[in-house]
């Protein structure tokens, strides 16, 4: 099986930008005040495992669910691209981090690993839509395997980032904002590409796939 480098890079970049481990780190700190490093480590890995399970379900069955309810893949590309573009706007104007912090403030559970960290902070609407879009871009075993492997890689980075959240905090709010805005610009471009691909499938404009 020959590796599709361009597709692999697209999957990697899209999932990294949407899940945004760096921006989640400060929220993770807010959700785990006063906990030891060992406790934070367990919460981080538990959250990542739950999020991975949820995303794997949508990678395996997402397109089948869309077919069952009568939604075509091109239509979902357009809708998903718009959703990701709105996420990019939130990142560019720093509304996404604020929303995540609001969710953290509303949570009163002792163990935040499943809610709100795994769902919806990691496995939220943006990442779920991205998983379905990316598997639909390259149907078959190769595309599915690429998405799953890249998802596992990003989730591993997420777990390590959450565990190192105390150190990342040292780059300061300004540093995190700069990184988030750069990732937002990248996500905006990727989302527009998804919309263009979907429109091309309906015969609007040239196909880019």
Image: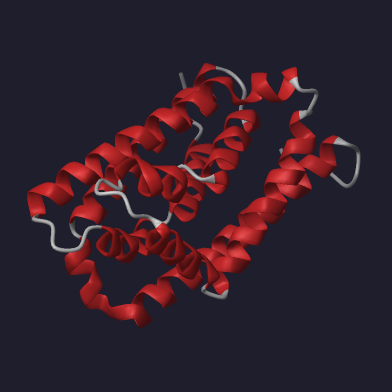
Q: What is the x, y in percent for residue 185?
A: 57, 67
> Do we see residue 167 in this rendering?
yes
Residue found at x 76% / y 22% = 69
Question: In this rendering, would 21 be left or right of 196?
Answer: left
Residue 149, relative to residue 16: is it above or below?
above
- Say above or below: 14 vs 140: below
Does residue 157 appear left or right of residue 40 in this picture?
Answer: right
Q: Position of residue 187 (x, y in %)?
A: 57, 58
Of 112 and 73, the residue lying toward us: 112
**Quadrant (top left, top right, bottom left, bottom right) of the C terminus:** top right
> Is residue 193 something one can see in this rendering?
no
Q: Residue at x 30, y 61 (%)?
A: 25
Foreground of the two, 21 or 202: 21
Where residue 19 appears, as percent x and y from the top left, is: 44, 51
Picture residue at 51% right of the left edge, 32% below the top? 4
In the drawing, does residue 207 fall left or right of residue 86? right
Q: Is residue 68 above or below residue 50?
A: above
């Amino acid at each position: 099986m020959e590796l599709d480098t361009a597709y692999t890079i697209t999957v990697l970049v899209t999932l990294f930008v949407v899940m945004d481990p760096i921006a989640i780190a400060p929220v993770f700190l807010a959700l785990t005040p006063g906990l030891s490093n060992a406790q934070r480590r367990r919460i981080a890995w538990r959250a990542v495992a739950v999020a991975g399970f949820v995303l794997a379900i949508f990678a395996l069955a997402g397109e089948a669910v869309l077919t069952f309810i009568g939604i075509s893949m091109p239509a979902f590309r357009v809708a998903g691209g718009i959703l990701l573009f709105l996420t990019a706007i939130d990142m560019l104007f720093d509304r996404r981090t604020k929303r995540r912090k609001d969710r953290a403030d509303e949570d009163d559970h002792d163990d935040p690993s499943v809610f709100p960290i795994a769902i919806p902070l990691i496995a939220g609407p943006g990442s779920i839509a991205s998983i379905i879009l990316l598997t639909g871009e390259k149907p078959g075993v190769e595309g599915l395997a690429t998405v799953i492997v890249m998802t596992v890689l990003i989730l591993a980075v997420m777990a390590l980032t959450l565990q190192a959240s105390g150190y990342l905090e040292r780059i300061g709010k300004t540093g995190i904002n700069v990184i988030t805005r750069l990732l937002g610009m990248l996500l905006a471009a990727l989302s527009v590409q998804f919309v263009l691909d979907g429109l091309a499938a309906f015969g609007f404009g040239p196909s880019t796939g």
